[in-house]
Image (cartoon, grey):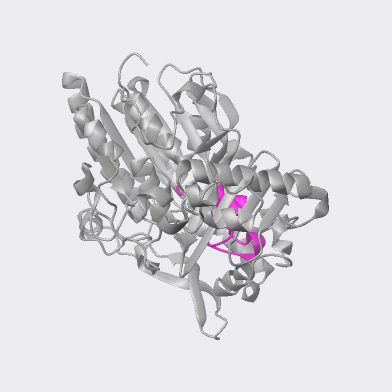
Amino acid sequence: MSQPSNVLFLMTDQHRVDTLGCYGNPHVSTPHLDALAASGTRFDACFTPSAICTPARASLLTGVLPFRHRLLANYERNVGYSEELSEEFTPFSRRLRERGYNVGIEGKWHVGRRRGPGEFGFDGAHYPGWHNPVGHPDYLAWLERHGLPEPEISEEVRGVFPNGEPGNLLAGVLHQPAEATFERFLTDRTIERLERYAEDHHRDGRPFFMAVHFYGPHLPYLLPREYLEMYSPDLVELPESIKETFENKPPVQRRYSEHWTHDTLGEETTRRLVAAYWGYVTLIDEQVGRLTEALERLGLTGSTAVAFTADHGEFTGAHRLHDKGPAMYDDIYRIPGLLRVPGSPGGGSTGAFVSLVDFTATILDLAGAGPEPDADGRSLVPFALGEEPAGWREDITAEFHGHHFPYPQRMLRTRRFKLVVNPESVNELYDLEEDPSELTNRYGDPALGEVQSALIGRLYQRLRASGDNFHHWMTSMYAVGGKDYDTSLSDFEGANHQGLA
């Protein structure tokens, strides 16, 4: 790129790929994100490094995988891990500041308990927590200034917990007009900041990075009735994985199904929930339209790259689950990824495996900066310009560390197969060509013995090369090509004593 680009970075929370028209959904209205895909590049094999908010967002901020930055759980249900990001890795926001950028963010932060965007070099308020903070004083003041009502909900949708108590809130009617929603508030705040940044850009050429991180379409789906009931449940085709039996699966998946009360809801309610989720996606797409219109009005379209992605997906009934958790299915690990770069041809797509940490490298590349020396991602700009970088990854890994309780997992995803290692439970192997819904666990199937061995070896090498200490467990438990180090890590049993290289 000849000169640094402005960047508008759009991010949603817990967003399924199959809710977007540009990814093949024939029912959900997403014209603005579809237009972004049509004018840019769509990434069809985009994955999160961890399907939980805080680890994923910390990876985006730092460009490194969760096991390295060590912010491994959402603080609301922390299971003993760090609650604040260390200073070991430089956030991309500080790199942009060093290059003279205005750097702003509006919306969900969720990177640690106390330190907000300001401590990392961003302009913008700290909106804490995992869900729309509708009690935040800035939002309440905005409502009062515009004569809009504060939020109230009714007609709550809940299942029943295993102990007989009412389950988690899943959906409800929000008694506000669309103009009063938190999504509208965040968009208004973003546009106001874009207007200030546009003045600097047009006056002295100062570039900007502006992010808006929507809290939706994360459940619970609390929406004005027009969006909650925008789509008929009759349009919803439930996924094949709704037939999940949990046979030969890690028992934790059945426990999570019980926690999310799936079997107490019934098929009609499940369809209603999916339809409501679609309405939430449309509400957010409308805000994306307001943002792209603002770029045009401010004369910024031709100088601004636009990216869209999510921190992770959501089950919405797939595998008899809701939310996310210790089950490494594509429903929650595959995420949307769109990128439009000034001067690019547009209208392209790629099946290359890309990761959320690649967006970090992309932001720095658009600013004319190289990646951090120890970064785990690579820039996606060449894809947007119609090129595939040499030596691009042929598979992708992901990790999980626990939510509600510690539960370590590692995944290797290739074009056809997925391997999941669950140390205390049943490992998983799926043939995605024959079983795209990931219903039949083939781990231990003699017919896939060679495939299983190859995948175990490949995952082991990936983890070991990256420094992920999970590989120590694999060294002793699986045939990974021969032990070439002392697994006890004892000074008394060094390589010389063992005759190991």
Residue 272 occupies which quadrant of the picture?
bottom right
Residue 203 occupies which quadrant of the picture?
top left
Q: In this view, does 96 lie above or below 62?
A: above
Query: Quick check: 269 left or right of 121?
Result: right
Nearer-the-camera pick, 406 or 162: 406
Q: Where residue 498 appears, x then y in whole percent? A: 54, 51
Residue at the (30%, 64%) spot, across then down: 150
Residue 360 occupies which quadrant of the picture?
top left
Q: Where residue 264 appears, x then y in whole percent? A: 63, 76
Q: In this view, does 162 lie above or below 485?
A: below
Residue at the (38%, 40%) spot, across then down: 63
Can the viewer see residue 29 in this picture?
A: no
Q: Is residue 298 above or below residue 399?
A: above
| The furthest residue to the bottom | 164
Nearer-the-camera pick, 230 or 10: 10
Nearer-the-camera pick, 337 or 76: 76
Does the magenta run of residues contain 315?
Answer: yes
Q: Where residue 227 appears, x then y in whole percent? A: 49, 55
Nearer-the-camera pick, 153 or 411: 411
Does the magenta run of residues contain 73?
Answer: no
Can the viewer see residue 106 in this picture?
A: yes
Q: What stretch is highlighted in magenta?
A: 311-333
Residue at the (35%, 33%) spot, across then down: 8
Q: Where residue 40 appears, x then y in whole percent? A: 49, 26
Q: Quadrant of the N terminus?
A: top left
Q: Is the magenta stretch mostly helix, strand or loop?
A: loop
| The furthest residue to the right | 447
